[in-house]
Amino acid sequence: MLSGMTAGAELTLDQLAGDAAVERLYRQVFAVLARESGAMISDVELLDVDEAILDAFADAGRDGLTVDQAVAACRPIDPGLVHRRFEVLRDYAAISKVVDRPNERYHRAAFAPYVMLLFLRRMAEQGGQAELHQLLTLEHVGVTASDAVPETGRTSINRLTRIFRHLGNELAILAAGSTAEQLGDHAQLLWGNQTLIGQAEDVHAVALDRWPQLDGECAALRVALAAYGDAVEKAAGRLIERAGTTRALGLLSVESWLSFARTASEDDLAGVLDSFVFDAPAPWFSPTLVTEAVESGRSSSTVRQPPPRPESATAPPPPDITPVDDAARLRQTAELLLRGADAVCVAAVLDDADDWLAARRALADLTAIHHHPDLEYELTWSDGLRIDIGGSASWVSDGSFRRTPPETSAA
Amino acid sequence: MTDDDTALWWARYRAGGPQRVAPASAYPAGMTRLIEPDAGAVWLLPELPPGARPDVLDELGLPGVAVDQRGDTARVLAACLRCCWTEPSGPIWPAAPAPFDQVLAVFRAVTGSRDERALHAAVMGALRRLAGAGWVLFDEDTRTVRLGPRVAAWSAAELSTLRELWRSLPLPPPTTGSGSPSAPRAAEEPAATDRETYE
């Protein structure tokens, strides 16, 4: 008794092998969804890589493929990525060595992952609706089979009950607390539900007819179906209400709208805007506006005004900017300094000045006279140096200022 | 006329502007009937209370319906007023038709020097825009312009402003050739009496 409850100990080798086979299949099936051991993929592109690898194995025939061949067969895909996916698939035994020995290079692929892949794709595209229909058809076949026993019917009914509870719960939660956009994303739960419910009722009717002892299970199924129907009504009502007031075009995909627009009749298309009134795009012209427009039209037709200029734009520039030729003044200064002599010592000129400021001015005049091209005077410096500690110019280079008549400069 | 019909007429006006109907047809409450000069048709124009007129948008500082070349369009409307409203002491509807060239001349005088082709294009474009909104009726085949039913929406105070404008605008040149506005007075007389209001 005790050992029976704690399972395990009583399991035979066959049972263990069976469990191991089921577990292996699970691992294989979910290999395509594995990012690495123990984690799910987060990127749908990886599914494409998986599919490419499995396709390559399908094309390879019974010899199998080496890793490099598989990489080559998946050519446009990044080889590193293919390598990594290959390793993941091998970890989950979706790909295994043809012969299990250390140096085996050829691998073979199990078929279960590929079936899972196809299933996933269909689920992604159609939201599992078609799978549900097929499942219900299978259940129907199952319960109507001549060799079916009450236990078959019971498991069938229980399965259906759970499925519809799941569907109904999800929808009811969505309808109660999500935005219309979220609801629209899950709209596939709403579509085709009448046939789903109808199919389930068929199964229910067959099972109840054949095995009246299952009425408890059948009642549970009826409740689940009714709950699902209610949830659908509620969600659809909410969706229609929201879509009707906001005309939220995002509730259906762009392609759905396009298909409707392409295939609908004129009346259908016109019906879309039946309840709409568009304001006529009529601009309003108030008399003030018209008057202003006329006045601005007049002013814009007048002669263009030149840009404003300063008041005295035409006045001559200030005189102190114009260059002055002060040759006359300089000549006068030079004659004054020379006092009729031909040359004068610079030191003497500076001594004649009252202070350093005047001396400095005299020195500047001498330099200007020297540099003036029209004046025949020159300033020459030599090596001597006069030092006078007490003087206003404490040292003066030995220099002389003299006139340079044209004939002497030529000589 | 039931409430539904009345609502439908208002909706038609909102969607399509002033409605042109047969003279004998029923019309809803709160709409002015503007009879065409030849009495061949009637325009239905709603009488809006002062607080619900389009110029309320201006008072509220809200943008109204945008119109291309707003300034030129308004100037062309002014030119049409000058040409068609031959008797500004009287009502503005139905004014006399005026040839396109007359409107063009007034517009040219208002806007000053402009390339002749650009001038023509501006007037033509503005007339089409105004005709689309019901401010003028523009017959492109005969190239004649009339004031549209919407001008009757201007209130008495607004009309006095427009009379000031009318006086300030240059005189249109005398019509030449087969222009039709030779009988403005004939059109004017029935206008005053034809204008009825359903209270």
Image: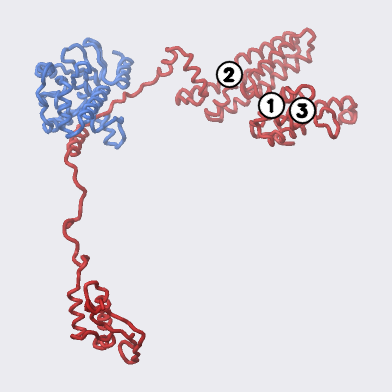
Q: Nearer the viewer, residue A185 or A387?
A: A387
What's the amino acid at mark 2? Trp
Residue A77, position as x, y percentages in the image: 66, 32
Give neighbour class at mark 3: few <14, some 14-19, many 20+ (Cα, 10 Å).
Answer: many
What's the amino acid at mark 1? Glu
Q: Nearer the viewer, mark 2 or mark 1?
A: 1
Q: Colour of chain B?
A: blue
As measured in the structure, the alpha-carbon distance from the residue carrying label 3 to the one carrying label 2 is 44 Å
User: Which label belongs to residue A65?
Assistant: 3
Q: Nearer the viewer, mark 1 or mark 3?
A: 3
Subunit of mark 3? A
Residue B176, position as x, y percentages in the image: 10, 20
Say which element carries label 1. helix
Chain letter for the part of the structure drawn in red? A
Query: To which residue does mark 2 refer?
Result: A191
Query: To which residue does mark 1 refer?
Result: A51
Please tell me which of labels 3 and 2 falls first in the chain.
3
